[in-house]
Image: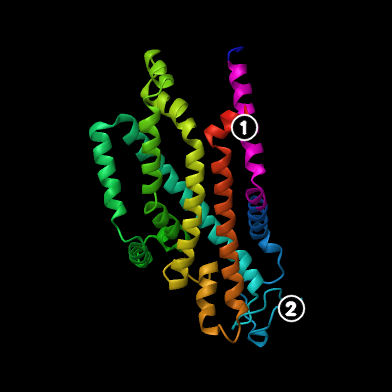
Amino acid sequence: MSSSLPNARRVEGMGRLIARRFFKHRLAGIAISVLAILVLASILAPLNPYSPTDQEPVNSFQKPNVAHFFGTDELGRDVFSRILYGGRVSLSVGLLSTVLSISVGILVGALAGYFGGWTDSVLMRITDAFLTFPTIFVLILLGALLREQPLPWMKNSVLIVILIIGALSWMWPARLVRSLFLVLREKEFVAATRALGGSDSRIITRHILPNCIGPILVSGTLQMAYAIITESGLSYLGFGVQPPTPTWGSILSTAQNQVFRAPWLGFFPGLMIFITVMAINYIGDGLRDAFDPYVIHSEK
């Protein structure tokens, strides 16, 4: 019991140091506040008095006003409400596909980097094969094909987009984790744990993987930004989340023919994508600085 207390204090102290360094990055602090507001607004979308799908043709093409903050579209639907509900989908796709891709990447990269040899060769050749796929065309093709499947769960276009994006973006985290494991497996603490009889699974999960958290989190922010942009692009092209479910990309798609008549239809969803991606990127910058081992060591 007594030996575990210093370790707990050390972890707590390191956590406070990382948090302090993260919030020293002013843009990262602002970015996480902005992202929190976007997430909260999306969660509270049902409180908005207007439905994202109800059509009122008599109110079509209203400019932004007190009743409709972001105006209305060609069918009289409230754009503000559609953006709030669209944020639910876009942010969920970004987060869940990132969790999927990072999880697969950690599994593949850890096995390849720790065991090496033929395991490394086979897994990395598979990774290289996936990297050769023209991602956007594969996404379009799979999105079109899977929507035609008779299975009920495959009719959920949000789930399909999450699975496809996650399945085609795990390669970069895998290569990152592999490179980290190749370095860390040669460290003294790994050799000491192995000499004391520690199993491979314990060494991987309890000793090496925790030392990779910083780079993995930074990679996760890049993956999430990529996923949101990809989903928006797919929905814009008509191969992503299908109507009537609104997403920022699909709202942009319907606005492309009304650029001059109703510019607000494209401006607001485009602004949401821009703000979200920039916020996530700045959060990644803050995490990179916070987990920098050289700076952390100098501040201890």
The picture places residue 34, in percent across and down from the top left corner, at: 66, 56
From the viewer's perspective, tell me whether residue 43 is left or right of residue 172.
right
Q: Residue 24 or 247: which is nearer the viewer?
A: 24
Q: Is residue 50 above or below residue 192?
A: below
Distance Cα–Cα, label 1 vs label 2: 46 Å
Q: Residue 262 or 89: which is nearer the viewer?
A: 262
Circle 2: residue type: Asn
**Magenta segment range?**
4-30
The picture places residue 55, in percent across and down from the top left corner, at: 62, 80
Q: Residue at x 65, y 75 (%)?
A: 78
Q: Which residue is mark 1?
A: 15
Circle 1: residue type: Gly
**Helix, strand or loop at disc 1?**
helix
Q: Residue 62 or 29: which is nearer the viewer?
A: 29
Which label belongs to residue 65?
A: 2
The picture places residue 234, in percent across and down from the top left corner, at: 44, 67
Q: Residue at x 54, y 61 (%)?
A: 89
Residue lying furthest front in this view?
298
